[in-house]
Image (cartoon, rainbow, N blue to C red):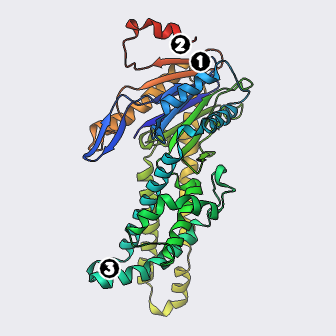
Amino acid sequence: MTAVLGILNKQAIAIAADSAVTIDGYNGRKIFNKANKIFSLSKYHPVGVMIYNSANFMSTPWEIIIKVYRKQLKEQAFKELSEYVSDFISFLKANNYFTTNEVQLYHLALTSYNLLKELIDLFENQNADLKSMEQEELKNSFHERFDPFLEKIFERVSKSDTICEDFDEWKYESFIEYARPATDGMLEKHGISEGSNNTYKLFHQILFDVIRSKNDLSGYTGLIFVGYGDAEIYPGLIPVHIADVIDNKLRYYIDEGMSGKVSDTNSGLIRPFAQTDVIDTILSGVDPTLNNIYMDNFGLLLKKYNDAVLSNIGDEHNILKAQIRQLDTESITKEYIRLNNEIRNERYIAPLMNAVSSLSKEDHAEMAESLIYLTYLKRRITFAEESVGGPVDVALISKGDGFIWIKRKHYFQPELNSHFFTNYLK
């Protein structure tokens, strides 16, 4: 896990990231605190990229891919930040996605296995009585109930209209032909084979829609492009979710909701990613999880209040009772939430954003580092897993000065490796 963020104003964009990376192994989880998550995308122009979640693309580390792209880019510049994103995606495709057909099928098999396991776990939770059945009865009841269960899941996922760009024209017939080598063996181990029952087709229909959907990019990497295009005087930030490659199609989409750009009417932005709980608390004035509990409790108490009023009204007032029961407590709760959000925006968030818009470059960088450090500190002093930690890397990107490191860890001693810095711009 990780914590990264960008803070933008008209002066510059400050970016910061921790160094923790969590590795899942056969014997448990281990956290290392030496990961690099911030990179300059160009050696000559004010553009950078941050990464979070998965450190690899298929089987290739993102650090290698980014540095190969940077070498190829050389002194080329684009008018807008979005063009750097498009060019980077084109670069992935032009290099065969840094993967092979065999690796693609392996990842499809892994996705299929995880999906089937998730579906079976969900099914068993909804059908707890199956555990008490004898083996033969269990086998018959499982298949009788599993197909209707899958039909409901398929009905839900097939309604998604958020499809990854490369999969928009992908047909189910093409998918099933491609997927068989990756899925048939795994399904046969669970007694599911083509032609024996409807489960085979239902599972593949669900898998097809899950693969195409933006909402189900499991194991994705967040690539956050930051900086300026040549024609832009204010900085921007564009997050891209990239998962894997299936049938030479890239599973990715741009997270429009988290994208941001400084303008004359929007002069300060803060965008946290990955583990955002502490940063969100500081930015909004209340812990988001705790705030949701408050809102839920208000709705429950409002309902209990109505029930208490009803219990104290005699039977001779049945018309009044009926009117009270028809009261829309849900809309009252929504109004309560809206009023709270308005007050929070007016008295807390807006003044904070106004302050961010006027920060100097030095304060800009210090704020970015502090927000990451506070996330680490909360993990450190509580019993939560210390999944944010290690040195905090900080960089500042401005239109005039370009990409400037404020704090950066090295795996080598800089004073012993002057040739590295000499060769950097060659």
Where does residue 406 sit, x and y in percent of width and height? Answer: 48, 18
**Residue on which disc 1 sits:** 43
**Residue on which disc 3 sits:** 130
Residue in the picture at 47% in, 36% down? 60
Answer above or below: position of 77 versus 350. above
Q: How crowded is mark 1: few (under 14 residues within 10 Å), some or many (20 or more)?
A: some
Q: Distance between the residues labelled 2 and 1?
A: 8 Å
Q: Does residue 187 appear in the picture of this structure?
A: yes
Q: Give the numbered dot on residue 424.
A: 2
Q: How crowded is mark 2: few (under 14 residues within 10 Å), some or many (20 or more)?
A: few
Answer above or below: position of 93 versus 316. above
Where does residue 366 sit, x and y in percent of width and height? Answer: 47, 23
Ranked by sequence position, the earlier of labels 2 and 1 is 1
Q: How far apart are marks 3 and 2 (CA)?
A: 64 Å
Residue in the picture at 41% in, 83% down? 311
Answer above or below: position of 84 versus 187. above
Of the pair 421 and 48, the residue shown nearer to us: 421
- In the image, what residue type sits under mark 3? Leu
Please state, as top left, top right, bottom left or bottom right, where the C terminus lies in the image: top right
